[in-house]
Every structure is written in structure tokens, then in C-alpha cells.
Image (cartoon, helix red, strand yellow):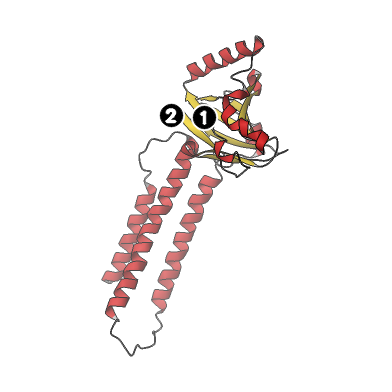
Amino acid sequence: MDSKRIAFVAALGATLLAVAVDPVAAYSSTTERLIQTLNGQLLYAGIPIAVLVEGILIYTVLKFRNNDEPLPTKENRRLEITWTVATAIVLLFVGYASYGVMANQYITTTPQDAMNQEANAVNVDVVGQRYVWTYNYPDHNITGSSELVVPTGRPVYFNVTSKDWIHSFHVPELGLKQDAIPNQHHTLKTKLTETGTYQVYCAEYCGVGHSNMLSKIKVVSNEEYKKWLKQQQQENSSGGSSNGTSGNSTSGGNSTSA
């Protein structure tokens, strides 16, 4: 085996070794972890290929820059077989890695997944409407909440829909994004791992108030979440709304101008 083949095999082996190791990082949700891990694997696979191709290109330009009478390329069956096999290996790896993530229920939640929920799962109905997000907790009889509060360590199902036209529920820091379509219900599943407050956007242009269609998702401990539920239920029973949809009054104020 000549030096070129040794270098190629070494580069390929280093790439496969790199993608096999999941980098240690703090992720806010299982969904974000899956997406970022896939992105990292594809990046590790792409960098050696890009370096190899650019290296060959630079070498060729420098070596033959003064060649005014180039000769026809000779057939090299071994080289053709090598790059065909290498390309097939790369494509198989990309397909396998992508399918393993895209088929995961934390990325693509099927209706069957939504029906077969875990016993401790949290259900939230996410409703988009010009230009405000509202959240309902059907399991706890909490409706019209402008504050989205969810616990860590438990599966959370977001049932996303719209009352008027297409919006898009998007929480970049948690790896969550789902179109909100009138008369349709689509489910997102995730599990939160880090407490904190995260920004909610509308990622589908929906009118003059689109840029103000903002909200927050507050991730708390399970104990704090139970206290919040109890507080909201008490407010509902006393005749008040649970935070009320007026919490997004800055956004909602644009609805009359559309």
C-alpha cells in the first residue's frame, strides 16, 4: 500500500472515530441533543472530505500551472473503484445517522406516539392566533394561560394548532419547531433537562404583528411545577384567568390593525 492510500485510509478512519464519539456538552432538551449530535457527526464527516478535495485541487493547480500541452487523463480503474466505494460509505453513513435521528419520537412524533404517552407525561395545547400564543393544560383544566411552564425530567407533549392562519411555534434553544395550522393538530414531544427561561418565536410570517408574536417558556423543577399548577387552578376556581391572554397585550394589540 503506497503513501497516498495510507493517508486516505488514515483520514477515513479518523473521521469514523470522531463521529463515533459524542461530544460532551450541556443540552437543554433531548430534542436539542439529538439535533446537535447529528449536526456534529455530519460536520466531522464533511471536514476531511472538504480538506481532501481542496488539497487535490490546490496540488493540481500548482503542479500543472505551467503545463501548456496537457495530456489526456489515463484510465485508472483502481482509483475509480476507490472513490466510488468511499462515496458509497459516506452516503450510507449520512443516511444511517440521519434516519436514526429523524425517526426518533423526540424529533418526529407520530399520532401513535402521542396516543401511547407515559404515565407522567405533561400535555400542553399550544394555540397560535394573531399575534399571540396561548397555552392550555387539558389534564389540569387550565385554559388561556399566557405563560408556558413545564417541568424538567418528564416527557412533554405540545399539541400545536392555530385559530386563524399559519403560524410556527419555534423555540430555538430547545430545538423545537412546529407549524401551527388551522383545523390541524401536530404534536411535538421533548424532555427538558435544564431549568431556565427560553424565548418562543413565530417562525412563519403571519402579518404586520409577526415580529411581536413572542412568548416565553419557563422550565422549572417538578416540585415548582406542581406549585404553579395548584396556583393556576386556585385562580381559575376563583373566577380569574390563569395569567390571562392579556400577558401578550403588546403583541395582541396589533391584531386590530391587520
Contact? badges 1 and 2 (CB < 8 Å)? no
Q: CA distance from mark 1 to mark 2?
A: 15 Å
Near mark 1 (Cα within 10 A), the count class, few <14, some 14-19 or many ≥20, is some
In the foreground, 171 or 164: 164
- Tell me the residue that label 2 is attached to: 194
* Direction bottom: furthest residue: 69
What's the mark number on residue 216?
A: 1
Check disc 2 and report its element: helix, strand or loop.
loop
x then y, percent, for residue 69? 33, 90
In the foreground, 191 or 141: 141
Q: Residue at x 30, y 86 (%)?
A: 67
x then y, percent, for residue 14? 32, 56
Residue 204 visible in the snapshot: yes
Q: Residue at x 49, y 17 (%)?
A: 224
**In the image, is 18 to the left or to the right of 174?**
left
Q: Quadrant of residue 90?
A: bottom left
